[in-house]
Image (cartoon, grey):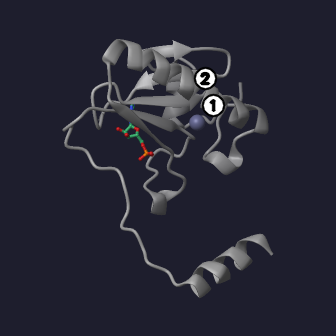
Amino acid sequence: MMKKDDCIFCKIANGEIPSKTLYEDEDFRVILDLGPATKGHALILPKDHAANLLELSEDTASKVLGVAKNLASKMQEKLHFDGFNLVQNNGEVAGQTVMHFHLHLIPRFKDDGQKIGWVPGNPTEEELEAIRNQIVE
Ligand code: AMP
Ligand code: ZN
């Protein structure tokens, strides 16, 4: 496994530091977040170190949503949540605090008091066209 020596999620993912593990396979460990937004808030951790989505191998990237789907399915059955959010922060400016890729699965319950979101903008058609061109050209 590709590990980074000073990375706490490498140590957790590879079992060197104990965690509340919900699932494990060859590529991933899924744990309970120690600062949960809601009951059951889980983190999907690849065992190989990657700082963020851009560093993740194609193979791992292609598998991670399947892990999330299976976990969500199990949680729906066991926790009876009303919905869930998948959150994945890349970079400090985006709120990433642990620099080892992780996908949050946050179960949502009616009136759970949590809010995950952003302030919507109101761009003109020209502004949308300009950003589209910047990205695709
Ligand atoms: P992010 O802000 O996306 O980098 O999320 C980091 C998450 O990791 C936060 O929700 C923390 O509560 C959680 N966290 C940090 N350290 C640990 C740990 N040792 N075990 C479990 N969760 C952790
Ligand atoms: Zn790591």
Number of marks in the image?
Answer: 2
Q: Which amino acid does label 2 sit on?
A: Phe
Q: Is mark 2 within 8 Å of ligand 2?
A: no
Residue 122 position within the rendered picture, expressed as x and y whole percent measured from the top left: 44, 78
Residue plotted at (67% across, 22% down)? 27
Find residue 84 and report its horizontal and vertical position in percent.
40, 34
Image mark for residue 28: 2
What numbered label is drawn on residue 64?
A: 1
Judge the density around disc 1: few (<14), some (14-19), many (≥20) Cα neighbours within 10 Å. some
Left or right, 115 with reference to 20: left
- Location of the C terminus by quadrant is bottom right
Task: Tell me the quarter of the picture where residue 20 sits.
Answer: top left
Name the image quarter holding residue 39: top left
Label 2: few (<14), some or many (≥20) within 10 Å? some
In the image, 81: left or right of 43?
left
The front one of 123 and 14 is 123
In the picture, which quadrant includes the N terminus? top right
Residue drawn at point x = 53 percent, y = 46 percent: 99
Q: Nearer the viewer, mark 2 or mark 1?
A: 1
Q: Is residue 93 above or below residue 70?
A: below
Label 2, label 1: how many angstroms apart (C-alpha)? 8 Å
Q: Which residue is drawn at 38% across and 62% down?
A: 118
**Quick check: 133 above or below 23?**
below
Q: Please tell me which residue is depicted at 46% across the width and 37% down the height of the picture.
A: 104
Task: Give amino acid for label 1.
Answer: Val
Name the residue furthest right. Answer: 137
User: Label 1 near label 2: C-beta < 8 Å?
Assistant: yes
Position of 120 compared to 109: left or right?
right
Circle 1 SS class:
helix
Residue 12 in sight here: yes
Q: Position of residue 127 (x, y in %)?
A: 58, 84
